[in-house]
Image (tube, rainbow, N blue to C red):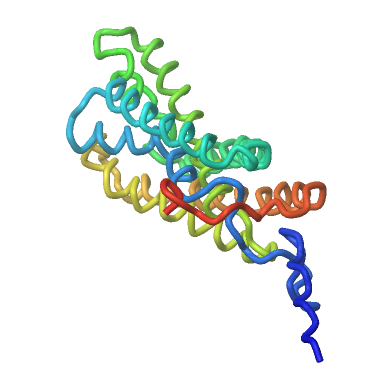
Amino acid sequence: MTTPPPPPPLPPGLPTTSGDVSPAAAPLPLARWEGLAFMATGAALVIHILVDVPLWLSATTTVAAAAVVFTMAARRHPAGREGGQQVIVAGAMAAVVALGAYDLARLAVCEVFDFSVTPFAAFEHFGAGLVGESASSGAKTAAGAVFHVTNGITFGIAYAVLAGRQLTWPGSLATGVAFGLGLEVVMLGLYPAWLQIPNLREFTEMSLVGHVAYGATLGALGHRNLTRLEATRPGLGSRPEPSGIDR
């Protein structure tokens, strides 16, 4: 009596059991290193503050390194390029709204409680590192604002790639808030000494509210956007076995 051949494997992205109604939190078509690469401008700011390297130089270096990561990833996994681009767009859309929530929340706290700190004081410091101390105040503020927006959007994409694919809306909300609180911890560890903030209590309360608003919005909208994307692209979470840069 011959043994029947084993059943063929299921196509990528299909549930493996009857109870698995939604794909598990498998990697998206972008890997860990690619997700971290979207934090390049944030890494540049940390280097600028800790090592006193001009921000334009540290940003050029970290963005160039991120470009290398993206290029290597695209060559290793060309089949996942389209899915990766869609995840980036979904993350960016959520990040734009989250950035607005972040700034509005901080501004509201300052206005309602008549804080002496201001939510956008860092812009000129960012700009000074990008265009030089000798530039006009308007030029430094404008450059700093662009840097702020860039960070808000790319951080949101990084979240979508690294942690945005949660099975439930509450899980996404909690993960988003945790991501925002992680950014808050880094800010509190660097900004007070760098900016010589006179009222640390007010600054902490303002930034904490802002980062919770940012993370909650990222989590909620990221879950919605990625769920809709998966509905139109079955198997979004599948990709070849990681190798090289993905490890």
Residue at x 55%, y 60% (from the top left corner): 175
Residue 163's spot in the image, x, y percent? Answer: 55, 55
User: Above or below — where is 123 with respect to 206?
Assistant: above
Residue 146's spot in the image, x, y percent? Answer: 47, 22
Left or right: 202 with respect to 129? right
Quadrant hosting residue 23: bottom right
Q: Nearer the viewer, residue 31 or 136?
A: 31
Q: Nearer the viewer, residue 21 or 152?
A: 21
Q: Nearer the viewer, residue 10 or 226?
A: 10
Residue at x 21%, y 41% (from the top left corner): 193
Quadrant hosting residue 87: top right
Residue 46's spot in the image, x, y percent? Answer: 29, 38
Residue at x 39%, y 25% (from the top left corner): 123
For residue 111, say whether it is visible. no
Left or right: 88 with respect to 65? right
Residue at x 48%, y 34% (from the top left corner): 70
Q: Quadrant of the C terminus?
A: bottom left
Q: Quadrant of the N terminus?
A: bottom right
User: Above or below — where is 51 with respect to 190?
Assistant: above
For residue 119, say whether it is visible. yes
